[in-house]
Amino acid sequence: MRSTSRRASPEPALPFGLPEQREARPRRSRRKVAVGAEFVHTLGSDALASLGFPAGTQMVVDTTRTPRRGDIVFVRSRGRLKVGVLDVELGRPALRADHGTFWLDPTTEVWGVATAADPPLDGLAW
């Protein structure tokens, strides 16, 4: 094996010119929620009714917080927004709700963690 090149002269450059450099445009995000923001989401189902959050509950969702086990988490999976309590089942991350358990796959996008809730006052007896 040789440690030096056999060629006496360097290889000539190809006759192609370099492409023109464009100005860098800022990329638009498809998400409506800015990074580091909080938004309010109204629950449309009774998925968390056993925890005291019936349909119509308004929840403040923090998109910067990392979810931990036991947190109420909003995720988007296969084009649907799901809400539940983050847990582990059979060694896999899962989302538990009143409608059952949903295993989280690698394509699932976590939107945020619920930090505050305001349940509706319709069912309270005065």
Image (cartoon, helix red, strand yellow):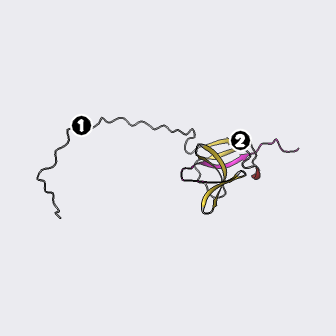
C-alpha distance separating marks 1 and 2: 58 Å
Q: Nearer the viewer, residue 80 or 31?
A: 80
Q: Amino acid at mark 2?
A: Gly
Task: Please state which of residues 112 and 109 is positioned toward the viewer in this rendering.
Answer: 109
User: In the visual, does 63 lie left or right of 59?
Assistant: left
Q: Residue at x 60, y 63 (%)?
A: 91
Q: Quadrant of the C terminus?
A: top right
Q: Which residues fall within the magenta stretch?
A: 103-125
Asked whether 105 falls inside the magenta stretch, the response is yes
Q: Residue at x 44, y 37 (%)?
A: 26
Quarter placement of the N terminus: bottom left
Specify which label sits upstream in the sequence, 1 or 2.
Answer: 1
Q: Position of residue 27 (x, y in %)?
A: 46, 38
Helix, strand or loop under label 1: loop
Find numbered disc 2 in the image and state the secondary structure of the residue it sits on. Answer: loop
Residue closest to the far left: 8
Image x and y of residue 82, in percent: 64, 47
Q: Which residue position is annotated with label 1? A: 17
Q: Is residue 107 magenta?
A: yes
Q: Residue furthest bottom?
A: 1
Q: How many marks?
A: 2
Is residue 55 shown left or right of residue 73?
A: right
Residue 102's place in the image compared with 25, above or below, is: below
Residue 44 in the image: above or below residue 86: above
Q: Is residue 30 above or below residue 115?
A: above
Q: Amino acid type of disc 1?
A: Gly
Q: Which residue is mark 2?
A: 44
